[in-house]
Structures are given as C-alpha cells and as structure tokens.
C-alpha cells in the first residue's frame, strides 16, 4: 500500500502590462540603452526614468561616444506612443507630456573598475549577488503562474492594439494567477484576478464579462482551468484612471514580475536601463542560461543558481546551487564545481557578455525585455539550449 502523503499548496504570481507606469519607465530606459549601444557598443548606461501625470523625467549616468546623436526625448515620446498613451484627455499623452533630462556621464571611479586594457579582465560593474532559475513544469522552463500571467496580458494587449472592437481597453492592466501544486507539479488554477483599465464607456458589467470570457478562453489552453476556478475582474468596480496619471512609475520597481514571479530568489538589482557591464543584469541572464540548460539536461526538475561578484573583479566570488531535492544523478556541489570551473559556463563579465552577444543584440532589443518578463521567451539568447551535451560530458552523466 502506498502511504506517501500528497503534498498540496497554492502559489501566486502577478504580471503587469506594458502600460503599467513602472513598465512605461522600464521601456523608456531600455529604449535609450538600445540607442546608445547602436552608436557605441561599449557605452556605459545606467538610465533611470520616472513618469507621472503628463511628465517624464530621465536621470542617471551615460557614457557614450556619440551621445549627442541620441535624442532621449524623442525616444521617450516614441515609446509612450507605441504603448498607446495618445489621448490628451487622459492626462498622459505622448505628444504633450513635459519632458526633463538630467542624464550625465558615468563616475570615473566606477569606470576604472569596469574598463581594462585586456578586455577579458573586465571587472564586474558592481558588487552583488544574482540568481538564475529554471523548472521543467512548463515548456519555457518557467514557473506556471508567472508565464500564464504574462501571456494573459499579452493577449489583451494584442486585442487592444489590433481589434477596433476592443478599443474600450486601455494600456494599464494587471493579472494574478494562483496555481495549485501537488507534489511540486501544477495541477489547476485556483484563482484569476484581472484588473484592466478601460474607457469610461467600457466600465460596465458587460465589458467585464467579456474580459472574463476572454481570460477563460485563453487559460483553457493551459489544461489547468477547472469548473472551480474563481475569477475576479476589476474587483474595485471601476478602473478608468490608470497609467502614469493614476500612479507614478519608476524604473526597476517590478523586479519580481521581471523574473520568476517570486518562485525563486532575487538578488535585489533591477535590470532595465543598464548596459551589460552591470552584472546585476547580465549575470542574472547568464545564471538563467545555466539553470535552464541544467534542467534541460535532465539533471534536476528545478534549479536555482546564485552567483556573487565584487566590483572591479573579473571572476565571481562564489556560486550556490539549489535543486530542491529534485536532482537526478548529481549533487549540488558537483554543479557548483562545474560552474566555478569556467569550462562549460564562463561567468566572467567579458566572457558572458560575449557568449550571449549582449553588446550588439541580433533579432531582439533590450526594450523587448522591459514588458512581460525577461525570461521564458525564445528570442532572447539566454534562453538557448546549446550547453546540454557539454554539461553531460563534463559531469560524465
């Protein structure tokens, strides 16, 4: 007789749309980064954006050879227009918002640690610890709750932008999914929350019923929807005033939305607006790359990698791997030794930037990362699965 107990728990993650004020800020910061790298692949960028009622402000440090050719205000207006904030009456409009620019050059104290005569000796742009994570519970090797939260909002965004029938949907929205797990595997969606900004005309029960219908139609594809799944659509009753008019936004305030929805640890550093010499961005990408390949190699069902750096030092100071009792034929210590060896994954800043092509993106841009998550989308180079055979060879498994 099987006496093993069935362990059950519920885990919740949220996503926010490209029209959320914090995501507006992230997209502007990353669009400026993209433009700087086009003019100077070795540009050093730490660009912050804040948005509020009809205002956008940029602050931070940028060192770029042709920065005078980068029109940051034009970039900001383009991003806001692309998102869909083009209605003056809503008090945040791409054509009319006030713009302020306080960007300046990077500190020479930081630059001397990052710049080296030998490129391969490039030091980390800051101290800190970064995390990468992967799980085999979805095809994208991402946690179910955050994946489906992102996808739900992407579906609404596409409808809003392409189907005039849904013109009553506005850019700001949030989703939240609570997923039931049994013995570590997702088996059902318990609760769905969608708060979507609408026009005044769209703030009706009939329109909210349509949002629920669309959400159910999409989530039915996951195989996790059940008759018991609860839905809450605009639970406050009305969501018309939204975006930067309803709340201020700031670069880097959605780090859990950006990563694994709270399923894995986070080092604390934000991503958007930072060039890849900042390891809190680039090393987090590389740690995801390593964790995903380890899981894809069948060595664990879940893998979390922590890597830590000292500013100006080219090699990581430590690695910590957790597989949460899901490893197959290897130990965490063996995986840590593999990572530290540099023979499969080279975590030196120069090497990982080169390995992922982070200075000259091809087929993607940093602005693409700034909404709907930095992980789980095949277009990004840190999502490639090209180290599986090398991992198995190194570990002799």
Image (cartoon, rainbow, N blue to C red):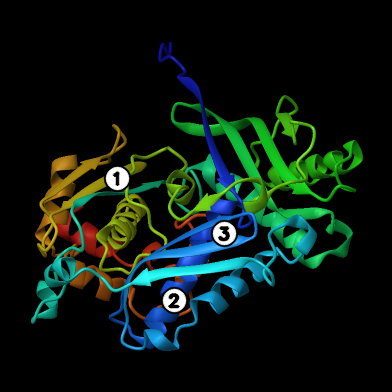
Instruction: Give the class, few, some or many, for how many residues have Cα within 10 Å of label 2's Cα (few <14, many ≥20).
Output: many
- Foreground: 28 or 264? 28
Say which residue appears at 21% left-offset and 63% top-offset: 125
Classify residue 342 as left or right of residue 371: left
Question: For mark 2, what is the residue?
Answer: 34
Question: For mark 1, what is the residue?
Answer: 267
Q: Which percent across, then down, holds residue 233?
A: 75, 35
Task: Give the number of marks.
Answer: 3
Instruction: Give the class, few, some or many, for how many residues have Cα within 10 Å of label 1's Cα (few <14, many ≥20).
Output: some
Say which residue appears at 37% left-offset and 40% top-offset: 264
Q: Rounded to the nearest whole Å, what is the CA distance between mark 1 and mark 3?
A: 23 Å
Question: For mark 3, what is the residue?
Answer: 24
Q: Which percent across, then down, holds residue 310?
A: 12, 55
Q: In this orientation, does residue 291 appear?
A: yes
Classify residue 253 as left or right of residue 127: right
Snapshot quadrant of residue 272: bottom left
- Foreground: 244 or 315? 244
* For marks 1 and 3 on the same chain, the one whose residue lies earlier in the sequence: 3
Q: Which percent across, then down, holds residue 207?
A: 87, 43
User: Taking 117 as reference, is 89 above or below it?
Assistant: above
* For marks 2 and 1 on the same chain, the one whose residue lies earlier in the sequence: 2
User: Taking 34 as reference, is 102 above or below it?
Assistant: above
Instruction: Give the class, few, some or many, for how many residues have Cα within 10 Å of label 3's Cα (few <14, many ≥20).
Output: many
SS for callout 3: helix
- Foreground: 63 or 10? 63
């Amino acid at each position: 007789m099987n006496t093993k107990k069935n362990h059950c728990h519920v885990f919740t993650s949220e996503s926010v749309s490209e029209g959320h004020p914090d995501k507006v800020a992230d997209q502007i910061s990353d669009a400026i980064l993209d433009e700087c790298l086009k003019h100077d692949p070795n540009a050093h960028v730490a660009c912050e954006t804040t948005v509020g009622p009809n205002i956008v402000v940029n602050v931070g440090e940028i060192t770029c050879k042709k920065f005078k050719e980068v029109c940051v205000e034009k970039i900001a207006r383009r991003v806001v227009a692309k998102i869909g904030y083009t209605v003056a009456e809503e008090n945040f409009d791409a054509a009319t918002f006030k713009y302020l620019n306080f960007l300046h050059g990077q500190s020479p104290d930081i630059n001397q640690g990052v710049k080296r005569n030998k490129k391969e000796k490039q030091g980390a742009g800051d101290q800190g610890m970064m995390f990468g994570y992967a799980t085999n519970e979805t095809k994208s090797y991402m946690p179910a709750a955050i994946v489906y939260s992102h996808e739900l909002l992407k579906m609404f965004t596409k409808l809003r932008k392409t189907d005039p029938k849904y013109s009553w949907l506005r850019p700001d929205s949030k989703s939240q999914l609570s997923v039931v797990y049994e013995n570590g595997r997702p088996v059902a969606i318990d609760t769905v929350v969608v708060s979507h900004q609408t026009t005044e005309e769209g703030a009706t029960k009939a329109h909210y019923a349509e949002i629920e219908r669309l959400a159910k139609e999409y989530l039915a594809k996951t195989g996790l929807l059940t008759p018991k799944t609860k839905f809450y659509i605009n639970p406050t009753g009305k969501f018309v005033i939204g975006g930067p008019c309803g709340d201020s936004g700031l670069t880097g305030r959605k780090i859990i939305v950006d990563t694994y929805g709270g399923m894995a640890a986070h080092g604390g550093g934000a991503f958007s607006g930072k060039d890849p010499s900042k390891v809190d961005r680039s090393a987090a990408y590389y740690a995801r790359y390593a964790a995903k390949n380890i899981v894809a190699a069948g060595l664990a069902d879940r893998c979390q990698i922590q890597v830590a750096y000292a500013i100006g030092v080219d090699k990581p100071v430590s690695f910590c791997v957790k597989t949460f009792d899901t490893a197959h034929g290897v130990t965490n210590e063996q995986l840590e030794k593999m990572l530290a060896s540099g023979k499969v994954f080279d975590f030196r800043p120069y090497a990982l930037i080169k390995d992922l092509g982070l200075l000259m993106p091809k087929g993607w841009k940093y602005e693409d990362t700034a909404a709907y998550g930095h992980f789980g989308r095949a277009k990004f180079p840190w999502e490639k699965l090209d180290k599986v055979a090398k991992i198995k060879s190194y570990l002799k498994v």
